[in-house]
Image: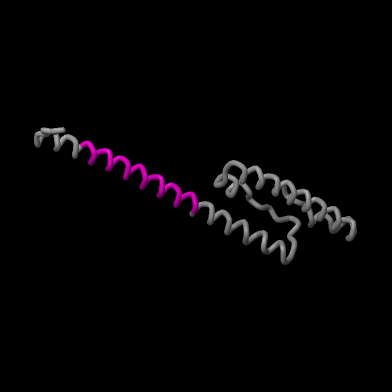
Amino acid sequence: MNFNLSGYTIALIAGGFGIIGALLGNWASHRFSDHRDRRKEFNEAADALARILTKEKVRPIPSAHIDFFSFQRVIEGRKLRNFNRAIELYEKAKKEQETNLCHDYDRSRCENFRVVS
């Protein structure tokens, strides 16, 4: 096989590969930076949520309102479904806690233990 490629043809081929390489590099760097930003948002939301839940673990705060939305918007798919299920269980436990506190104390003190929805 004898390939007689002129300098012009070689320059066109090299330029084509250069353009394709630049486009792929741009796409890959965009994907990596997007992933980094999402991870950063996730960590910020998780830190805020962990701080509140850690305080509640040590000393339950019946009237605490937790902003779950900031965390929900950074997770997707099955993790989001599992997280929503965990929120339902958490809210159910908070309602049970409120009920138990109201039975343990007199009714006048129950106003301080309302769960904010």
Residue 14 placement: quadrant: top left
The location of residue 20, given as percent across then percent down, is 27, 38
For this orientation, the residue located farthest to the bottom is 58
Q: Which residues are magenta?
A: 16-39
Image: 39 above or below 56: above
The location of residue 42, given as percent across then percent down, is 53, 52
State the predominant SS element of the stretch in magenta. Answer: helix
Q: Nearer the viewer, residue 76 or 115?
A: 76
Q: Nearer the viewer, residue 36 or 1?
A: 1
Is residue 79 magenta-colored?
no
Is residue 27 magenta-colored?
yes
The location of residue 99, given as percent across then percent down, is 85, 53
The location of residue 12, given as percent across then percent down, is 16, 34
Q: Locate the N terminus by quadrant.
A: top left
Q: Is residue 23 left or right of residue 35?
A: left
**Residue at the spot x=19%, y=38% of the render?**
15
**Residue at the spot x=65%, y=47% of the render?**
83
Q: Is residue 77 left or right of residue 10?
A: right
Q: Nearer the viewer, residue 65 or 81?
A: 81
